[in-house]
Image (spheres, helix red, strand yellow):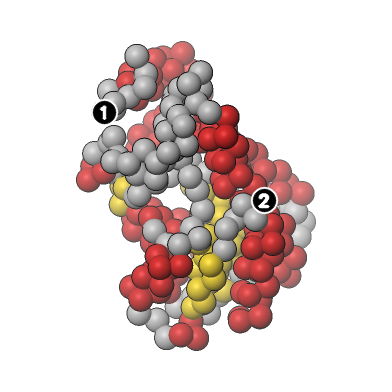
C-alpha cells in the first residue's frame, strides 16, 4: 500500500484518526479531513510524517461544496485517489417517540449524505485507479439498535448504498468494502446527540472494555489491502449478525436487555 493515496473523512479523532495514522505508518499519502481543524492538526502531528506525505483539509461532509473541494485538493496535491474511506459519523441516544426530528435529519446528513457526496466526487478517480471505496457502517447497520433509530437507519442506508455501487461497477475494477465495527472505544458516544440535539456528554458504556480505535483501523486497512467485500469486527458483532439470521426474536430481547442496562438508559 506504500505510495497509495488515501482520503479519510472524520480524521480528527477516533477511528478516523487511527485510520489516518495507520495509513501514514504504511507509507501511504494521506488526505485527512474533518470539521475540527485543531483535531486534524493533532492527527498530523501524531503521524510524524514529512509534509509531502499528508494533507489536512477542513471540510464538512454535509456540504456538497466542501466534499467537492476535498476531492479536488487531494487530486491537486497527489494526482489522484486510490482509497476513499467515508468515516465521518455521528451517533445519538433517545427513544424515537421522544426525539426531535432534527436529530434524525442531522444523522442522515452526516452519516449517509456525507458518504454519498464525497463518493460522488471521488468516484471518477477511484475508477481510474481501480481503487477502493470504503464505508464505515456499523453492527447497527445490520441489526436495529434501540434508542439509536437515526444511527441505525443511516448505517443501514450506507450499507445499501455501497452494496449497490459495488454491483453497478462490477466490471470496472472498483473495490467496495463495507466495514462494520462493533462497539469501539472512541469519542462517538460522548458527541452523540440526545433527544433535543444536545451532546450526550459522558459515555454510558465501559470504553476500556471495547476494541480500540487503533485495532479497528488495523483490521480495516488489512481488509482494504486484501480487497475484501465485508468486514465485521468484534466477536459480539459477528454473533449479533449470526443470531439475527437464526433467532431474530431472541436477538431482539437480548439487545433490548443489554441496552437497557446502560447508564441512564432511555429504555424503561
Looking at the image, can residue 92 be seen?
Answer: no
Which numbered disc, 1 or 2, marks the residue that appears first in the sequence? 2
Tell me if 75 is positioned left or right of 200 in this view.
Answer: right
Q: Quadrant of residue 254?
A: top left
> How much space separates mark 1 and mark 2, taking CA atoms?
34 Å
Image height of 217 relative to 260, above or below: below
Q: Secondary structure at mark 1?
A: loop
| Foreground of the two, 74 or 191 | 191
Location of residue 162 in the rendering, given as x and y in whole percent from the top left corner? 65, 47
- The numbered disc on residue 138 is none
Q: Do the residues under discs 1 and 2 have CB atoms within 8 angstroms? A: no
Where on the picture, by quarter, is residue 260? top left
What residue lies at 65% left-to-right and 56% top-to-bottom? 63
Q: Residue at x 45, y 29 (%)?
A: 195
Measured as percent of width and height from the top left, residue 169 is found at 75, 54
Q: Which residue is mark 1?
A: 263
State the residue position of label 2: 116
The front one of 232 and 93 is: 93
How far from the left and from the top, in percent, is residue 131? 64, 65
| Apparent side of residue 172 relative to residue 63 in the rendered image (left or right) | right
207 relative to 52 in the view: left or right: left
In x, y percent, where is residue 79?
A: 66, 80
Residue positioned 64% across, 63% down in the render: 66
Amino acid at each position: 500500500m506504500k505510495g497509495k493515496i488515501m482520503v479519510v473523512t472524520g480524521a480528527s479523532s477516533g477511528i478516523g484518526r487511527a485510520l489516518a495514522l495507520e495509513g501514514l505508518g504504511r507509507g501511504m499519502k494521506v488526505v485527512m479531513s474533518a470539521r475540527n481543524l485543531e483535531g486534524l492538526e493533532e492527527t498530523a502531528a501524531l503521524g510524524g510524517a514529512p509534509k509531502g506525505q499528508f494533507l489536512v483539509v477542513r471540510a464538512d461532509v454535509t456540504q456538497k461544496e466542501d466534499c467537492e473541494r476535498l476531492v479536488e485538493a487531494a487530486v491537486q496535491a497527489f494526482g489522484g485517489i486510490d482509497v476513499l474511506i467515508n468515516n465521518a459519523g455521528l451517533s445519538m441516544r433517545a427513544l424515537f417517540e421522544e426525539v426531535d426530528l432534527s436529530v434524525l435529519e442531522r444523522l442522515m446528513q452526516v452519516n449517509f449524505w456525507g458518504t454519498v457526496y464525497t463518493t460522488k466526487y471521488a468516484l471518477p478517480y477511484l475508477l481510474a485507479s481501480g481503487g477502493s471505496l470504503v464505508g464505515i457502517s456499523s453492527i447497527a447497520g445490520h441489526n436495529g439498535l434501540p434508542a439509536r433509530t437515526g444511527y441505525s437507519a443511516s448505517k443501514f442506508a450506507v450499507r445499501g448504498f455501497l452494496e449497490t455501487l459495488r454491483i453497478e461497477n462490477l466490471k470496472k475494477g472498483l473495490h467496495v468494502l463495507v466495514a462494520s465495527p462493533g462497539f469501539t472505544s472512541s469519542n462517538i458516544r460522548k458527541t452523540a446527540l440526545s433527544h433535543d440535539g444536545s451532546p450526550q456528554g459522558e459515555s454510558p458504556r465501559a470504553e476500556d472494555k471495547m476494541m480500540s480505535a487503533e485495532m479497528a483501523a488495523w483490521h480495516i486497512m488489512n481488509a482494504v489491502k486484501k480487497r475484501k467485500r465485508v468486514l465485521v469486527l468484534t466477536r459480539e458483532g459477528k454473533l449479533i449478525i449470526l443470531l439475527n439470521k437464526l433467532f431474530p426474536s431472541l436477538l431482539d430481547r437480548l439487545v433490548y436487555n443489554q441496552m437497557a442496562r446502560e447508564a441512564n438508559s432511555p429504555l424503561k
